[in-house]
Amino acid sequence: MERIKENRIFCRKFSRREFLGVTKAAAVGGIVAAGVVGGVAGYLAGTSAAPPATVTRTVTTTQAGAEITKTITATVPAAKKLKVGYVYVGPVGDYGWSYGHDRGRRWADEKFGVNQVESTYIESVPEAEVAGAITSLVEKGCQLIITTSFGFMDPTAEAAEKYPDRYFVHISGYKSGAAGNAPNNMSAAFAEFYQLYYLNGLAAGAVTETGVVGYVGAYPIPEVVRHINAFVLGANYAYKKRTGKNIKAHVSWIFEWVAPEKARSAAIALIEEKNCDVLAFTEDTPAVLQVAEEYQKKGKKVWSFSHYSDMREYGPTAHLTGQIANWGPIYLDFYRMVATNSWQTVDIWSRIGDYMPYRWRLPAENSTAGKPEGTVYLAPLNPVIPSQWQLEIKKRYEEMKELIFEPFSVEGNLGEPIRDQAGEVRISSGERADHDMLWNMDWLVEYIEEPLPR
């Protein structure tokens, strides 16, 4: 299947607040997540982290019935730093994709031990220049190199073959040694959102007054398509349970990853021209949420979400909940493997429940939904969401931890088969979307008005 390459290119470096035009001084809190770092100092490779340490011990022994105390002084070799390099396709100031990866980098560094790892990154790298960026990191001595865009996949695989003594991780692609289509020193990983988008949809269907929801989409690639479908299925579930009517959904494509002005215009058009009062989005800034907040201030109820990062400060009234990623636990896994010489090529697709200290579902009343945990989790739930639907969201969140419930199933569609826009049944009773269907999704569910661009 032909894939549309990502192009998250942005050249000039900005601070996040300069980029977004936000001038207030309040800082955004970091992500807090569970993590346990094992002892790896004896295995670390790279440049010296600290000078050798001198250790003094007092030892008492018994000889011929008498106790003898000796003081022993020894020099312990210094732990050596692990060197890690990241390649970002966008600016770390976008507050979306690249900012999220950089937040994950800093999280992993902290958990691994800032004195035991030295990480660096190259931002705003065009796809045509990724090979050069990788070579630069190799020349700097990086043992582990992580590339963070779908369009970086082939150059990463080529680099893995060229530098067999280094380790590579590619984000959002399908090539890895584990899959048999890349060298064994290359792995793939992704933090997946479709489950969270379904929960966002439940929130949307619970609060919409017009029965019409909208989505500002970046590119019509399978990643975005499955997120749109999951969101609309969740919205239809809640809205139909409330009213007996199907939801209506509109999608506006902007063909950009970082384009706040385009996202803003698309959001306004969905509100003014399509009567949408809840908007989700895949664009790497809070622009859509900011538009919703502006309408709230004018007395019109419009709602939106967080995307990749907790964006509540950009829409304190309009923010319903949202999908948040912490890439840190995934990166920490790879740090440990390289540092301990225990590399295993893997293909990670992290969902709700992964990298959590306790994966078993909890009662809805005790749910951890809305709290930072694992690699993907919900932003806090706005109290405007009716209590019965908050409980439903929490129930489904907990069930997803154990894969008891999946959005792309008849159960996720009120017992009805899931059909595409042409009326063709895509998922029947007793079926769930498997990895291949999700990974290659190129159809939209029947409740969406606009056709998928080809």
Image (tube, grey):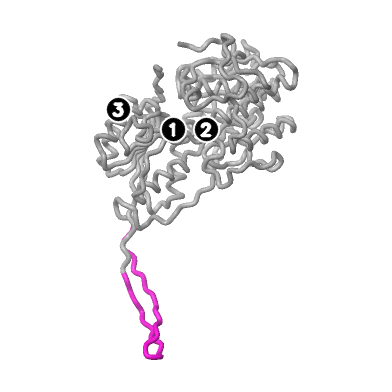
Label 1 environment density (alpha carbons within 10 Å; few <14, some 14–19, many ≥20): many
**Regarding mark 1 in the picture, which secondary structure is present there?**
helix
Q: Position of residue 65 (x, y in %)?
A: 40, 90
Q: Position of residue 452 (x, y in %)?
A: 51, 12
Q: Is residue 249 above or below residue 435?
A: above
- Confirm or deny contact between disc 1 and disc 2 (CB under 8 A): no
Q: Check the picture and name the quadrant holding the N terminus.
A: top left
Q: Check the picture and name the quadrant holding the C terminus.
A: top left
Q: Amino acid at mark 3?
A: Glu
The answer to whether residue 256 is magenta is no
Q: Is residue 94 left or right of residue 167?
A: right
By secondary structure, the bulk of the magenta-drawn segment is best described as: strand
The answer to whether residue 58 is magenta is yes
Q: Which residues are magenta?
A: 50-74
Disc on res. 454: none
Label 2 environment density (alpha carbons within 10 Å; few <14, some 14–19, many ≥20): many
Q: CA distance from mark 3 to mark 1?
A: 17 Å
Q: Amino acid at mark 2?
A: Tyr
Label 3 environment density (alpha carbons within 10 Å; few <14, some 14–19, many ≥20): few
The residue positioned 32% from the left and 54% from the top of the image is: 80
Q: Amino acid at mark 1?
A: Ser
Residue 276 placement: quadrant:
top right
The residue positioned 49% from the left and 20% from the top of the image is: 441
Q: For mark 1, what is the residue?
A: 98
Q: Position of residue 407 (x, y in %)?
A: 60, 27
- Confirm or deny contact between disc 3 and disc 2 (CB under 8 A): no
Q: For mark 3, what is the residue?
A: 129
- Confirm or deny contact between disc 3 and disc 1 (CB under 8 A): no
The residue positioned 32% from the left and 65% from the top of the image is: 76
Residue 208 placement: quadrant:
top right
